[in-house]
Image (cartoon, grey):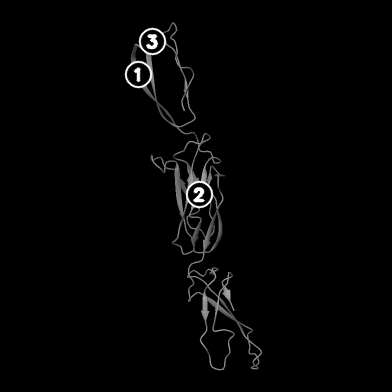
Amino acid sequence: NLTASAPSCTTDGTGTCTLTFTSTVSGSYVITATLGVGGPGLTNPVNHTLVFAAGPPNAGNSSLVLSPSTIVGDGVSASSATVTARDANLNLVPGAVVSFPVVPNVSGTGGTCTTSAVAGPGFGTCSVSLTSTVSGSYAIHATIGGTDVGGSPATLTVTAGAPNAGTSTWTVAPAGPITADGVAAYTVTFTAKDANGNTVTTPGTVFAVPAVVNLTASAPSCTTDGTGTCT
């Protein structure tokens, strides 16, 4: 990963000579300079450490990952939105400021994070925690210098929580009254909702109606389908 302009140099009349070293991979490199006297007999070996830092962050080479990409809309379940910042040569970049534009109904957006300079697995990365209480699909953007990073926008899916009797609803149609002839009927539609009022579209919620004297129901209960409703 270290390129020298030549393997050696020879002094001129000033007693000096010069080599140049370049790299596209950030890190520390130890070079050893030796003065050769007749082949293997070397004297005065000198070590020196060359340090190459990453360049400025490059949005196109940086990336956004949501983990997990699906959460429950209960305001507690969270997704970690992690950005890895890299420069033009794919080196990890510490100290890069990442912006997360506001997404309505998604807490954790509208702020920034700064990529870590601490050596280890998190070097060059930063994360924000995303939560929501409103089910749906949301486009999460992460930008560096106003430009979306790779993988941005990423889709965050928020699902409803468990059905909640207190927030679930039912409607009756028509408004009535109707004729008591055993033919005319009221239609009752039940909608399953979670504690935050999101419709529970996972099939299987059962609504039961206790029997009422002189009233005939099409069934004693119904089970919701993928729309979160049953009739």
Disc 2 to disc 3: CB gap under 8 Å? no
Give the residue drawn at x 54%, y 40%: 61
State how far apart marks 2 and 3 are (Cα). Answer: 55 Å
Q: Separation of disc 3 and disc 1 at Cα?
A: 17 Å
Amino acid bearing label 2:
Val
**Image x and y of residue 82, in percent:** 47, 48
Q: Is residue 40 left or right of residue 155?
A: left
The tally of labels here is: 3
Q: Mark 1 falls on what kind of element?
A: strand
Q: Which residue is situated farthest in the top direction here?
A: 13
Q: Residues within 10 Å of mark 3 (few under 14, many from 20)?
A: few
Picture layout, residue 158 above or below residue 208: above
Amino acid at the residue labelled 3:
Gly
Label 2: state its secondary structure. Answer: strand
How far apart marks 1 and 2 lie (CA) works out to: 45 Å
Q: Residues within 10 Å of mark 1 (few under 14, many from 20)?
A: few
Going by the numbered disc 1, the residue's amino acid type is Val
Tell me the quadrant of the picture where the C terminus can be found. Answer: bottom right
- The answer to which of 1 and 194 lies nearer the viewer is 1
Dot 2 or dot 3, earlier in sequence: 3
Q: Where residue 21 is drawn, which disc sits there?
A: none
> Tags 3 and 1 in contact by the CB under 8 Å rule?
no
For residue 119, above or below residue 197: above
Q: Disc 2 designates what residue? A: 65
| Secondary-structure class at tag 3 | loop
Looking at the image, the residue that sits furthest to the left is 44
Instruction: Point out the frontmost of discs 3 and 1.
Output: 3
Q: Which residue is mark 3?
A: 39
Q: Is residue 119 left or right of residue 82?
A: left
**Can you identify the residue that label 1 sits on?**
46
